Image: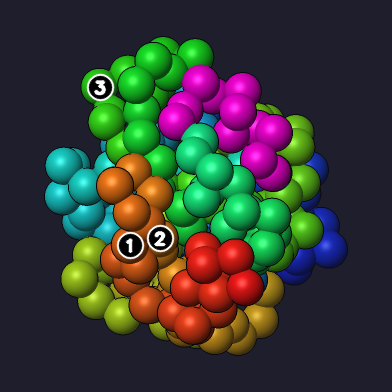
Amino acid sequence: MQVLPSRLAIERVVSSLLDGGVVLIPTDTVYGLAALPTRPDAVARIYELKHRPRERRLPVIVEDAEQVRALGLEWPESADRLAAAFWPGALTIAVGVRTPAVDWLAGRDEVGLRAPASELALAIARATGPFLMTSANMSGQATHPALADVLASLDGSPDVAIDGGELGAVSSTLVNTNLPEPVIERQGAIPAADIEAVLAGA
């Protein structure tokens, strides 16, 4: 495993992902484990590293709403308003999957999407297209703020780890728009009152 400071990160991370690697990167919320969805072996390693149940699908990281639209997903007006208000940022938006435009979304009926307020994450999405990422913690346990503790908590090592310093330990807020009315399914960095204000048109 190679550990790099964030200033050297983008080129090395993109190269590793394209080669089928798993990378650990800092975001605007917590450290995350990332892989390309077109590399099933790498995706499987993420599940193994954090003992994540396979029935729990991985969130998708995008650069912006335009990348979402290119995936052929359901994108209701409520999702558009939330993305306009909070992306890039600590908001995950769940949407429906009906007739996806990419093979790797086949079999999913719902997907969580986020455009983080992290230049590294956005640069990766710009270079590779949408990628999969989940918090870098053992499933069911808290996420550590420091890279060394994150690495020690995993069952194995990623191919590349980027040291972004000590991060906060608050996950993104999750809003599910694949319902008759949007529902906040996880309280996180963005307060519920801010979400509700945007959904209400305030």
Mark 1 residue element = strand
Q: Earlier in the sequence, mark 1 or mark 3?
A: 3
Identify the disc placed on residue 183: 1
Task: Name the residue: 75% across, 33% down.
Answer: 127
Q: Nearer the viewer, mark 3 or mark 2?
A: 2
Q: Earlier in the sequence, mark 3 or mark 2?
A: 3
Query: Mark 2 belongs to which amino acid?
Result: Val
Mark 2 residue element = strand
Task: Name the residue: 22% across, 47% down.
Answer: 56
Asked if 48 appears above or below 127 in the picture, the reply is below
Q: Say which residue label 2 marks.
A: 175
Q: Is residue 163 visible?
A: no
Residue 73 position within the rendered picture, expressed as x and y whole percent measured from the top left: 47, 28
Query: Mark 1 belongs to which amino acid?
Result: Val
Q: Nearer the viewer, mark 1 or mark 2?
A: 1
Query: Mark 3 belongs to which amino acid?
Result: Gly
Identify the disc placed on residue 119: none
Mark 3 residue element = loop
Q: Is residue 76 shown in magenta? A: no
Q: Is residue 73 shown in magenta? A: yes
Residue 39 position within the rendered picture, expressed as x and y whole percent measured from the top left: 44, 25
Asked if 40 appears above or below 34 in the picture, the reply is above
- On the image, which quarter does residue 37 sit in? top left
Q: Specify start and end residues of the magenta stretch as a single range.
A: 64-74
- Count neighbours of disc 3 (C-alpha within 10 A) and say few if under 14, some if 14 to 19, many if 20 or more: few
Residue situated in front as seen by the camera: 151 or 80: 80
Residue 173 position within the rendered picture, expressed as x and y whole percent measured from the top left: 45, 70
